[in-house]
Amino acid sequence: MTELAKSARNRMQMFERLGSPFAALGSGALRGIADLVDIVMHPIQRRLGIQRMAYVFVLPNLLIFGIFILFPMLLNFYYALTGGTQLLPANRPFVGMANFEQLFSCGNFLDPNTCDEDLFWRAVWNTSGFVVLQVGFMILISLVTALALNRRIVLRGFFRSVFFYPVLLSPVVVALIWKWILQENGVLNALLVSLGGDRQPFLLSADWARFWVVVISIWAQMGFFTLILLAGLQAIPAELYEAASIDGANQWRSFRSITLPLLRPTMLVVVVLAVIRAVQVFDQVYAFTGGGPGTSTLYMVQYIFRRAFTDQTHLYGLAAAASVVLGGVLLVLTLIQLRTESTSSLS
């Protein structure tokens, strides 16, 4: 009998000891499951041995990973090296690095107008600005919020739920709610007019659109990072703060000498996750501004989506090359952050 079947039978015996109709029903169901599992798994275990059974249980996950992650990645690399507008790989001619050369063909990388693929570099600079602002302010706000929620305040559980609630909403739902608030005849403009002010072009001005994209993204995601930082804060022993207080350290000194150093591993996780999410921003912004006005909120993933699926000419190879560049940037940023953390911990 396999170990899995033995575990099921042990649970079945536990149900039988309870002595209720529900226990009998549960016992019968578990007995049937145990027998079925034993029929299937016992010959496999007898042939492979107990030590190799772990590979049998890991195999379904490996298949899912290979089919839905590894194979699409390899196919994307192939598309990046091919040209044409045909979708099927067999109909796409091999062009080598031509797609990458088109992306990086620029007179001045700081001026997208001098680039052959100017939309790509507009998306690059828009994404860079978004990542710096969104990640920086979100980590700061999340840390302040976590510090506040870690204190003994009234209705602490309620406020923790309130800050986490936006994370549960779909990004598209978040975008539509805020679009309803910020549009020309929206709630916020109606409030401004009622107070004697003028309507503001929140969705028609490039500066306003960039500002609100950052604000909405922080509002929607900060609860997740606040929760992670809160868990890190609660893992710090209270005795350290008591000892610091006895030594005469004020709250700022305790925060600088105890909280920040011990929270550093958690902060690394938060920074890595926040950067990856920010670089990959798409659905929320696409539903909120559609990349406009103009190209002011056109980011990397939307550029890839646009080139591959929404433009009149479907440039799958160019989109695949841009996605490879995006993946490489994320890998480099993550390695730099991990390297920085390991260096600082050793010192």
Image: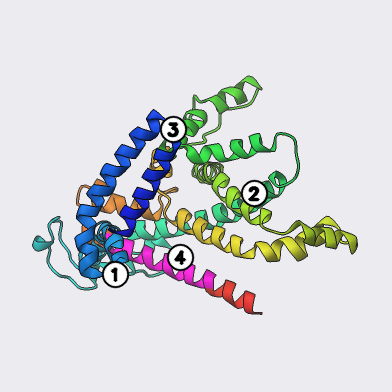
Q: Quadrant of residue 105?
A: bottom left
Q: Quadrant of the N terminus?
A: bottom left
Q: Amino acid at mark 2?
A: Ile
Most foreground residue, 340 or 137: 340
Secondary element at tag 2: helix
Judge whether residue 325 is colored magenta.
Answer: yes
Q: Nearer the viewer, mark 3 or mark 1?
A: 1
Question: In 3D space, how far apart are the residues under numbered discs 2 and 1 (Cα atoms)?
Answer: 48 Å
Magenta span: 320-338
In the picture of the structure, the residue carrying the numbered disc 2 is 141
Q: Residue at 12% across / 63% down in the picture? A: 92
Q: x%, y% of residue 93? A: 12, 66
Question: In 3D space, how far apart are the residues under numbered discs 4 and 3 (Cα atoms)?
Answer: 33 Å
Q: Residue at 55% across / 45% down in the picture? A: 211
Q: Between disc 4 and disc 1, whose residue precedes?
A: 1
Q: x%, y% of residue 185? A: 49, 24
Which disc, if any, is residue 176? 3
Most foreground residue, 62 or 332: 62
